[in-house]
Amino acid sequence: MPVNDIDAPQRVSVDTLVPRIPGVIFQFHRSHNGHMRFPYLEGGGMALKYVDRDVLARNAGQLVEQLTGNDHPKVMSAIEHSARCMLPLTTRFRLPIPTGKPRWIAVSAQPESAQDGVQWNGIMMDISDQVSEEQRLRKLCDTDHLTELPNRRKLMVHLTNVASLSTRHGTPLSIMMIDIDHFKRLNDRWGHLHGDEVLKQLAAQAQTLLRCEDMIARLGGEEFMVVLPLTPLQQCHKLADRLRQAISVRDFGMGPGQVTLSIGVAEYRCGEPLTSLIERADQALYSAKDVGRDCVCFLR
């Protein structure tokens, strides 16, 4: 049976195909003395619209630094590691675009020994959409959906980091445990939708009263925690009382004084387990409840 010409595969030349791919194919050479150049650089997408390929073919050092911006040290570190260990080069950087937001570019290349240095054969792809989706999912994992505050997971990561810095540098660190007084009674009387509105307004006002270096997070229900780096106990107590007073006089649609806070504060002891710090702040919160609510208590 004769072959149908319509079904026969059509051969496509490399010169025709490469400009159509959504990325860049490249050869990158680095000599032993650090001189960098791109002997080959072709492809589609936006990246090549804003670079001078002739310059890159001769000397890529200065232009690579300009194109990678704040990511330049990371990119150069990845290149050095790949050259030293002869392992695949994988990294990403933000490419500035004159007409809009920077685009995220992923680099993947295989090194090989070359005369006077190392040469990589690889591809660069625009992954901006992928990075945006990663950031969206990360925000969902780290954010309380109602108040848009950090959630418990993000708070504990942050607290672990600042506690490590506190131990290393001998700087103070304090936390607040916050609970809305009689929140169940408020929900029963005014409804859960109004209760949700109280939580959102409380979160918004707390953020305006706290400092930019402080982090407030919703732990769940009507309970919140504030992490205050570089803050000794006495200063933390003053900040907590300022927050308590501001909430007690705010009208949440039920009249002033209907929403009050009990707050427990504690200062980090260098090197102690974070569970111990949180437990002491919790005990201080229980003390605030026991003495009549709408107050701040602390444990040393």
Image: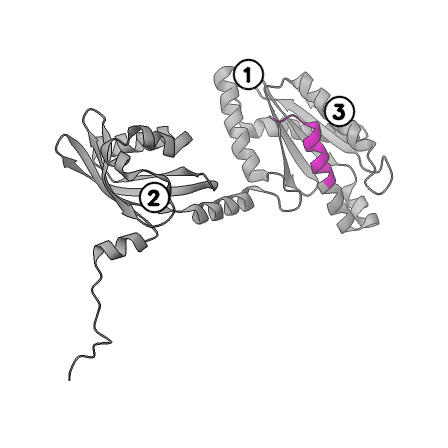
Q: Nearer the viewer, residue 254 or 264?
A: 254
For label 2, the SS is: helix
Check disc 1 and give the amino acid type. Answer: Thr
Q: Is residue 185 magenta?
A: no
Name the chief secondary structure element in magenta.
helix
Estimate the x, y position of residue 289 in percent, counting from the top left.
76, 32
Estimate the x, y position of residue 3 in percent, counting from the top left.
17, 79
Marks 3, 2: nearer the viewer: 2
**In terms of image quadrants, where is residue 55?**
top left
Q: Is residue 204 magenta?
A: yes
| Residue in view at x 75 percent, y 45 percent | 197
Estimate the x, y position of residue 283 in percent, counting from the top left.
68, 28
**According to the image, label 2 marks what residue?**
48
Furthest-left residue in view? 115
Magenta span:
201-212
Please report whichever mark, 3 or 2, sits nearer to the chain's N-terminal start: 2
| Residue in view at x 72 percent, y 29 percent | 263
**According to the image, label 3 marks what residue?**
242
Mark 3 → mark 1, Cα distance in angstroms:
23 Å
Check disc 2 and give the amino acid type. Answer: Leu
Q: Is residue 25 visible?
A: no
